[in-house]
Amino acid sequence: MESVHGRQERKLVMLNRYNQPNGPTNAVVTELGSFLGILARNAMLYRLNIHNWKNMDTKKKDLWDYTQEMSERNTKNRKKWMNPHTASKTSFAVIPNNLEKEKESPDELSAKELFVATRSRKPGRVYKDSNKDTISKIAEMEKMQSQQNEDDNQSFDAFIAIMGHEHLGCLRLYGRGVTKSTLKRKALSEPYLSANDERMEKKKKELEERMHQRMAEKLEQQQVTIHQEVTDDIIGRLNRMYPGLQLNAAKLASVGAQSPQEAMQPLNRPSSSKNHQGGEDNQGDDESSDEDLIT
């Protein structure tokens, strides 16, 4: 697994309700299973720094005998399987996710549906062993399930009726690590988890509302600042172009509050200032003409 140990960026692994890895893709889950298998090896017997069997030390004869014995034992145990699955390396924690995506109804998957999905063979492929027993059991499950549906019996489990009750240890069709105790603990903790989820959802909504309020206040403050800067810039330009106006923000606001006719009157009214000779001041006329140009 050099591709895993030498990886710079770690891949995300998703877990289901039983803390089994089930995503985001089947390839990630399969790679994780192979990686964990290397971590669980006996480092005293099999070392990863030896790439050739010839480079093993004098213990290789004992290791070979141990490996052969374990292989024979596993072969005998595998022949005892009556209905082997056809899922290959696909984790049983991934299969329910794929079935739920294809399923139209929101009902929870039954054990019978999982059994059928994990025992179906690909058409056209040649298999060493016959699956007549599996096919007959699936047919019996289908028949019993249809009868119970007609009687409206929702608690009936066709898988248990045909395959028998669960034994001690890991449960069937759940994958690795799921036992009866796991289901019991999950059932007991679900009320607390749901209540915690509700509290978290409530806090999330409150936080979102506060964030929206703060963003609205900040946006309003920015708009006021921008408006003030634009107003000051316009007043400054007008005062530089027409020094006689002497505009400011207060005067501009008072002009904006008046009607257009009222705002035009002080600008269009001729100047009444007199010079020392009793005539009209020409400077006032010039200022009035400047104001007329503005209007």
Image (spheres, rainbow, N blue to C red):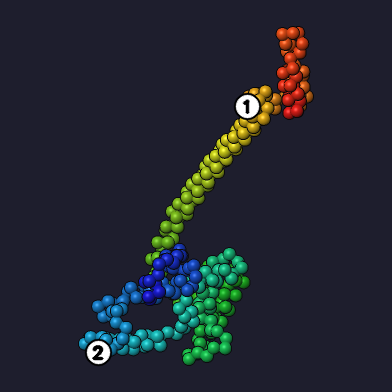
Q: Please rate how many residues cluster around mark 2, counting C-alpha atoms within 10 Å: few if below 14, some from 14 to 19, many from 20.
A: few
Q: Position of residue 285 (x, y in %)?
A: 75, 19
Residue 142 falls left or right of residue 160? right
Identify the residue at horizontal 70%, vertical 27% (top origin): 256
- Disc 2 marks a residue whose amino acid type is Lys
Residue of label 2 = 61
Residue 90 falls left or right of residue 177? right
Q: Of discs 2 and 1, which sits in the foreground?
A: 1
User: CA gap, disc 2 to disc 1?
Assistant: 98 Å
Residue of label 1 = 249
Identify the residue at horizontal 48%, vertical 47% (top origin): 203
- Disc 1 marks a residue whose amino acid type is Ala
Q: Is residue 121 above or below residue 108?
A: below
**Which image quadrant: the C terminus?**
top right
Whether residue 16 appears in this view of the structure is: yes
Identify the residue at horizontal 47%, vertical 83% (top origin): 83
Give the mark nearer the N terminus: 2 vs 1: 2
Which quadrant would residue 13 be assigned to in this image? bottom left
Q: 43 or 8: nearer the eye?
A: 8
